[in-house]
Image: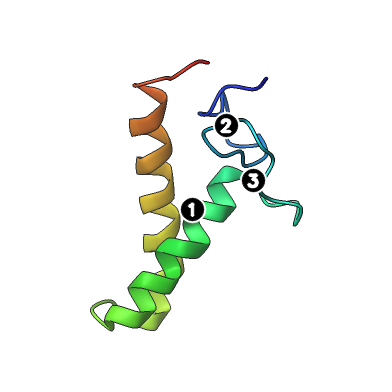
Amino acid sequence: MPNTYADDNFSPVYDENGTHISDSGLTKREYFAAFALLGILASRKCPDKDAAAKAVTLADDLIAKLSSRRVYK
């Protein structure tokens, strides 16, 4: 069973039970960035031209934080 937190940005997305939850081919980084982008655009607190870069930065920050606290089953 795979670990919940990926060892790199290119691992597929799994839930806490190790079930593959992304058949879209998205990496965790892309998946997190997409949801961050949705929140950024919905909040209207960031200019649209800067939203994508901010979303990727937030995704990278989340991956770094999760990587520092690995959980293995």
Instruction: Name the residue rendered at 38%, 79% in the picture.
Output: 41
Task: Tell me whether circle 3 and circle 2 mark residues in contact (CB < 8 Å).
Answer: no
Discs 3/2, front: 2
Residue 14 percent location from the top left of the image = 61, 38
- Left or right of 4: which side holds 44? left
Looking at this view, is 16 or 65 the one in front?
16
* Residue identified by numbered label 2: 17
**Above-or-below relation of 10 to 50:** above
Q: Earlier in the sequence, mark 3 or mark 1?
A: 3
Report the disc number at residue 52: none
Assign a secondary structure to mark 2. Answer: loop
* Residue identified by numbered label 3: 27
- Please, what is the three-letter code of the amino acid marked with disc 2? Asn
Query: 10 Å neighbourhood of mark 1: few (<14), some, or many (≥20)?
Result: some
Query: 10 Å neighbourhood of mark 2: few (<14), some, or many (≥20)?
Result: few
Looking at this view, is 44 or 4 the one in front?
4
**Coloring applied to the structure:** rainbow
Task: Quote the CA–CA distance across marks 3 and 2.
Answer: 18 Å
Task: Quote the CA–CA distance across marks 2 and 1.
Answer: 19 Å
Among the 4 quarters of the image, the one containing residue 63: top left
> Quarter holding the N terminus?
top right
Task: Quote the CA–CA distance across marks 3 and 1.
Answer: 9 Å
Assign a secondary structure to mark 1. Answer: helix
Residue 15 percent location from the top left of the image = 56, 39
- Please, what is the three-letter code of the amino acid marked with disc 3? Thr
Q: Is residue 47 visible?
A: no
